[in-house]
Image (cartoon, grey):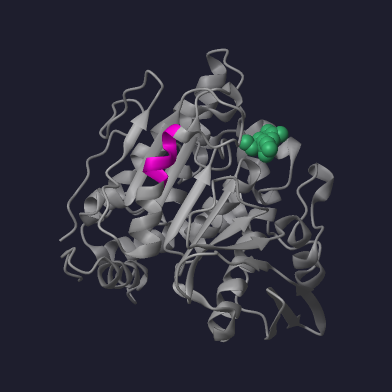
Amino acid sequence: MVSFSRRCLFAFLLAAAADALRVPQACPAIPSLTSFNDTALPDLFTFLDGRKVKTLADWACKREEISTLMQRDELGTLPGRPESMNVSFSGNTLTIGVTQSGKNITFAPTITYPTTGTAPFPALIGMGGVSIPTPSGVAIIQFNNEQMAAQDTAASRGQGLFFNLYGSDASAGAMIAWAWAVRLIMDALEKTPEANINTGRVGVTGCSRNGKGALVAGAFEPRLVLTIPQESGSGGTDSWRISDFILSTGISTQTASEIVQENVWLSSNFDQFANTSVNKLPFDHHSLAALVAPRGMFAIDNLGYDWLGPFSSYGAMISARTVWTAMGVSDFMGVSQAANHTHCVFPSTQQPQLNAFIQKFLFDEQTDTDIVETAGNYTFEVPDAQWAPWSVPKFV
Ligand code: MCU
């Protein structure tokens, strides 16, 4: 159990993250889920066997339950580390060569260094690029996610370097393949001090489809200290259940049944739920975001596009935030929904909020990140009778 003293945020954060991730030997078994059916967002504080999640150690088990089931039923399997990896660094390019079962792939993220600040630098991994203004003193690591796993159309299934290694019939959708590569980028940075990146201060961001990927990477790579999904919509910060509801009221919102026709972000194992009922899923995307806790997370949204399901994102993110609340660090998770603006063009109104998150999590400064703000006419609090009829404990 960690102390919640804020005197040294990073010592706290790392200890709390380690605690939240330390899976005790005796977690409740994951029951057969054929009968699961709930129109509300599944309770983050109840195991599927009915036991309550009361402590950080319980949360480590609950987190494992969510991670296991999300891989199985939605994202596909995140493979373990490959058999071997070779890293070289030259001319701001990190070349990562990986071998598995006699097959090899190479990918090469590039690093753009800040003109101010001190080495080793904090960094943001840009999932397919960065659509927030580059923070000063922060290196940008460009990750070409589409080379790793394609995301052009539904015909992109099984295409990209990841599938050259693990086979085109691997269960992974594109997003978990990207998360696997982000883990290797972190491994490579740790092995390469000459790259001058502070591996204890690396975050991830991306916009729209790449925002979905940024959230999955943040959820599955525990060394990332800050996750900034931007306008990620369905498959990202949105709830499958709330998006279905919004569509049923006649508002054109992307849903699970549409997304599986459109692209390959998710495993084909998800089709059975998307094509029948998402209520059968024992998780939703509040559960995905909750995997990030207690690390920093800032969910950025845009009210301008119904397709992005902004209310769905708001409901899911407020629900996810309860896990940070249970940990006593609700301000480590922020939600900001700006008024209509061009998709993926970051509005200046959100700049101070973004700065607060960057300064706290990448520079260890004491900033005010207690941010829950929407330009929408939404009220959502947990418990919510329709969507989140559960109570929030304080972990002991
Ligand atoms: C919000 O992300 C996606 C969305 O899921 C797709 O339906 C649409 O085609 O593209 C969006 C996007 O990535 O825009 C750049």
Image: magenta residue range: 349-354
Quadrant position of the N terminus in the picture: bottom left
Residue 325 in percent (x, y) is at: 24, 49
Is 247 on the left-hand or right-hand side of 388?
A: right
Outermost residue toward the front in this view: 115
Is 346 on the left-hand or right-hand side of 5?
A: right
Q: Nearer the viewer, residue 92 or 274?
A: 92
State yes or no: residue 350 in magenta: yes
Residue 129 in percent (x, y) is at: 65, 52
Is the residue 131 above or below the residue 308 in the image? below
Is the residue 142 above or below the residue 199 in the image? above
Residue 306 in percent (x, y) is at: 57, 22
Q: How many marks?
A: 0
Q: Nearer the viewer, residue 75 or 96?
A: 96
Residue, x 66% and y 49% (percent of image)?
266
Is 78 on the left-hand or right-hand side of 18?
A: right
Quadrant position of the C terminus in the picture: bottom left
- The prevailing secondary structure element of the residues shown in magenta is helix
Is 384 on the left-hand or right-hand side of 93?
A: left
Residue, x 80% and y 42% (percent of image)?
153
Q: Quadrant of residue 146?
A: bottom right
Dividing the image into four equal quarters, which quarter contains ligand 1? top right
Residue 36 in percent (x, y) is at: 46, 42
State yes or no: residue 361 in magenta: no
Residue, x 31% and y 40% (percent of image)?
371
Q: Can residue 34 be seen from the camera position used here?
A: no
